[in-house]
Amino acid sequence: MPELCRLLAAATGQPHSVESELGDYSVFVSAKNGDPARVRTLVARALRATWREDKGRYRLVSVRPRPDANYAEFERLFRKGMKVLPNPISVPIHDLYRMAPGQTIRYGPTETPYIRQLPAELNQPNVAPGGITIVRRMAAGVFEFEHGMQVSLDGLPESVTTFLGDARSKRPFTPEQIARIKSISRNQSDLKLDWSQAAKRDPIAAMQDLLLPQIAKEMACDLAVALPDFTFFAFADPEVEGFTVEAVLSAYSLAIVWTVIDGAIVGILPDCEYDFPGQARRIDLAKYVQAIKNKGAAGVSDLAEYVSDQRPVSSNTWTDVMMLVMAGVVVDQEFIGDYPYNLRLFTRLTPDDWTRIRSGRAFSAATFSQPVQDQVMDVLLQSRSRDFDKSTPDPATWDTLDLSRLTAQATYVEEPVLIGLTASGAEVQDARTSGMSYSRQRDRLGKEPLYQPGTRRKVKLQIRSSGQGQTVTTGFSEVVPSKIKPTIWRDLPSELAAAFKGGMEAILVKPDTGTGKPPP
């Protein structure tokens, strides 16, 4: 937006600015007549904002939508998405519409302090084991359920498809352009962006430059699209029936709301962006990438500081860490399922808390300082890893979550790892696990992956209740790269190469299913 304001000022001779909450969003605009006033209007429509003029100076400010402004379209797309699940589960859709992105809600037949009661008409026999249904809003239009089920909003309202007319079925991309798009969706480093300058050259906008201009050329009408960070996934997953205009635009529904306004097709920010803004602050992103440029990996202290500076919803939805991974920053996946809640806990540990942790002995969780106690509950109930780790009972169903009846105990672990330069970011794993995923990563890259030895230092924190198996393990880690330059696996030190080869051989017996950890 700051760059657009500069262009508008150059075109009109009048100063333009934008309020801080809107400054981090990009907007794609295709106005057929090129009139700056028309561009200004479309930008305001896409961002749900208005230009306030004072003595020839224009400032863009947000306008809060009326309650439930887009609920009807949300419900339509959500019901459409539920139909494709193998075992659709009924939940109060309006609750989901009102959820904060990154939030987890549990439903069950009986209400508790941590479980909402399902309305009688929605109680059903096919809910998750134990009668509990867990749903997490990953983003504005992406919902995760237990057992890997996911609903993503996908589709255009009838008013938009009608307005598109014949353009909806056009295929504006050449095979070479599609190959380029798919390549960058796998490895964003191919964009060759300077992420330390993200405030000036927005990475999300740079990706959309490969899609939206081609789409706009096929349309007789104007097009304006707000680009919140999660539009990256519209770009990254364009399995869209040959890249037709309709299919590509439909994919954006997971992050924006499509409508027809003032003779233009407009993708506007969803309601939840106003109640729970989730756009990563570009200035903080650029500052962090620059700060760790020479370190080689994101340390826990630096990463915790980054989380504390960023918008909370950006961290809760992993948008901020996703941006770091796209920038090529090495982020250890050891406790990624608990991100950012474990890092918020880390930032609140007092010297007395550290004394208890370093003792290695079990202690009452109620003896943590009060700020840490608040974070413990989020680690237990809001972390994404609760959706993936089914080896222990969900904490919401434990005998008690009274901290005075929970114990905590920490251990310190130091272990050798490999930093696998296998994507735009990196994977941090032990040598054997790296070997098990080798063929998958080689095929994904189209060349030999490179690996750098390193050391992982981590604090594992176990929180236990008295019931059978009622334990959660969380923690925080730091990876220190060695001075050995990245190399192919055969040239690794002999001990690491042997472990790596053992993992490769093991996968010949047991098929590779990935690391088992949720990706950022």
Image (cartoon, helix red, strand yellow):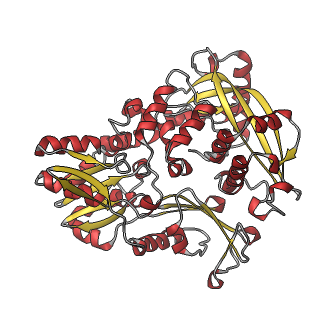
Rendered image quadrant of residue 119: bottom right
Residue 124's x, y, as percent? 67, 80
In the rendered view, does 472 fall on the left or right side of 342? right
Query: Is residue 80 shown above or below 273?
Result: below
| Residue at the image position 72 percent from the left and 28 percent from the top | 457
Identify the image quadrant of the C terminus.
Answer: top right
Residue 227's x, y, as percent? 35, 51
Residue 37's x, y, as percent? 14, 55
Residue 55's x, y, as percent? 15, 51
- Along the line of sight, which residue is nearer the eye, 423 or 137? 137
- Report whether residue 245 is seen: no
| Residue at the image position 41 percent from the left and 32 percent from the top | 195
Rendered image quadrant of residue 507: top right
- Report whether residue 279 is seen: yes
- Along the line of sight, which residue is nearer the eye, 195 or 314? 314
In the rendered view, does 417 fall on the left or right side of 240? right
Query: Is residue 117 shown above or below 327?
Result: below
